[in-house]
């Protein structure tokens, strides 16, 4: 089977990282993968078990994307086209697959709202839409998408790459210049508004008062970096906070933090939550989007109203003061991701989906023209 993947993300995290995991997991199952990606993106030079075709992908207004995608599809003649992202890929990828006569599937990773008619127009060419979470399923239903076209397949995490590591704490403290007695709260997210960093900043003064040893590490990059640094300086908290940027060595550092906080306003599922859980970390997160699919409150983490600074500060302070509870939550979170969010499970689910779509497309092509016409009118 040959699958042509389209991924528009420029950075190798979130969706693009999931594409890498899927493609590399499909290869041992004798799937011939072709990855069409942004020529200015990190996926173009990543280690992939695939033929990689970097092209220009410049968003919804890049009308030339259709022709570029059609050329790629016709050149490689895949059984299924799998579109993994937005930035024009979802709009033009589906149109290109339809023009080339190849069935297509779309993965919807975000729970952001869109005009109903626009959303339905974008998903119209796709035989199936993969939803990462129950929240995205519900959103697609609200858009009027037929539930039979929607299949839920969660993101995955490599639990061998992300795992508990007792040596990680010393490495983290040395790398970021943190004191030995620090109680480290980590955030792993793009520095963009919807990830809710401002909510954590609003809670930090009270948290620092209650837990003087607290230090906060912000992993990630994005357009809010300068403003976040300025806000931390204004609060007088820049001394106990590190803006660590994007770290390729995150799997070696993340197990060293004491807990992860994710105060997002919206979240399709949250790959960072899976990574933290795989490292055996306790998690405090907002109960939005797909996060409740990952965090079972009280068992694998705590769900807190992160829009309330006092509630967020209280939850973090209580958990930082309870090492036994942190270990209980972290151990349960690790077991849960091993059971429900493995790369093998994600790959198997996609193999079944591709086979279903390809078989349906083959059956339809095999029908006599008259039968197809009568079926369409029935």
Image (spheres, rainbow, N blue to C red):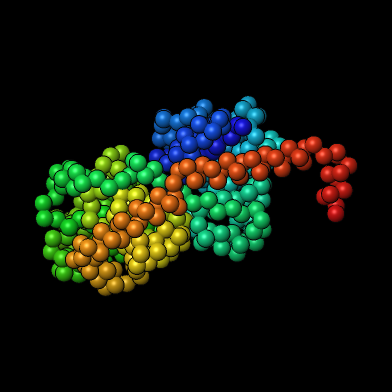
Q: Residue furthest left?
A: 180
Where's residue 362, x and y in %?
73, 37
**Front-lying residue, 164 or 16:** 164
Question: Can residue 162 be seen in this snapshot?
Answer: yes
Give the left or right position of residue 329, taking residue 320 as reference: right
Percent coordinates x, y for residue 349 in the rendering: 55, 46
**In this orientation, does residue 265 appear?**
no
Q: Quadrant of residue 319?
A: bottom left
Q: Position of residue 10 (x, y in %)?
A: 43, 40
Provide residue 46's location: percent of width, then percent of height: 41, 31
- The answer to whether residue 203 is above or below residue 356 is below
Up the image or down, 13 lies above or below 135; here it is: above
Front-most of residues 176 and 298:
298
Residue at image position (61%, 27%) is: 76
Residue, x 71% and y 37% (percent of image)?
A: 101
> What residue do we see at 45% from left, 55% from top?
269
In screen coordinates, is 124 left or right of 325? right
**Residue at image location 13% in from the left, 64% down from the top:** 212
Can you say which quadrant of the picture contains the N terminus?
top right
Q: How many marks?
A: 0
Left or right of residue 277, residue 343 in this image: right
Quadrant for the C terminus in the image: bottom right
């Amino acid at each position: 089977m040959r699958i042509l993947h389209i991924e528009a993300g420029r950075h190798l995290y979130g969706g693009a990282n999931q594409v890498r995991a899927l493609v590399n997991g499909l290869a041992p199952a004798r799937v011939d993968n072709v990855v069409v990606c942004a020529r200015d993106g990190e996926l173009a030079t990543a280690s992939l078990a695939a033929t990689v075709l970097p092209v220009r992908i410049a968003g919804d207004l890049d009308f030339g994307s259709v022709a570029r995608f059609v050329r790629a599809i016709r050149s490689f003649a895949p059984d299924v086209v799998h579109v993994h992202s937005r930035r024009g890929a979802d709009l033009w990828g589906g149109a290109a697959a339809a023009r080339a006569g190849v069935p297509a599937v779309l993965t919807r990773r975000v729970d952001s709202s869109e005009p109903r008619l626009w959303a339905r127009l974008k998903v119209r060419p796709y035989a199936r839409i993969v939803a990462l979470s129950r929240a995205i399923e519900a959103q697609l239903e609200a858009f009027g998408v037929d539930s039979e076209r929607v299949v839920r397949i969660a993101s995955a995490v490599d639990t061998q790459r992300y795992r508990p590591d007792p040596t990680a704490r010393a490495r983290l403290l040395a790398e970021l210049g943190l004191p030995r007695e620090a109680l480290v709260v980590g955030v792993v997210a793009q520095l963009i508004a919807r990830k809710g960093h401002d909510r954590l900043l609003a809670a930090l003064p009270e948290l620092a008062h209650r837990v003087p040893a607290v230090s906060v590490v912000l992993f990630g990059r994005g357009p809010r970096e300068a403003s976040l640094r300025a806000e931390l300086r204004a609060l007088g908290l820049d001394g106990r906070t590190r803006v660590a940027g994007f770290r390729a060595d995150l799997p070696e550092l993340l197990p060293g933090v004491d807990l992860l906080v994710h105060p997002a306003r919206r979240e399709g599922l949250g790959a960072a939550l899976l990574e933290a859980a795989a490292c055996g970390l306790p998690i405090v997160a907002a109960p939005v989007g797909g996060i409740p699919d990952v965090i079972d409150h009280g068992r694998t983490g705590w769900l807190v109203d992160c829009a309330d600074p006092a509630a967020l500060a209280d939850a973090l302070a209580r958990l930082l003061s309870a090492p036994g509870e942190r270990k209980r939550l972290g151990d349960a979170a690790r077991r849960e991701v091993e059971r429900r969010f493995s790369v093998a499970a994600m790959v198997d689910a996609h193999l079944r989906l591709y086979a279903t779509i390809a078989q349906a497309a083959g059956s339809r092509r095999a029908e006599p023209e008259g039968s197809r016409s009568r079926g369409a009118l029935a």
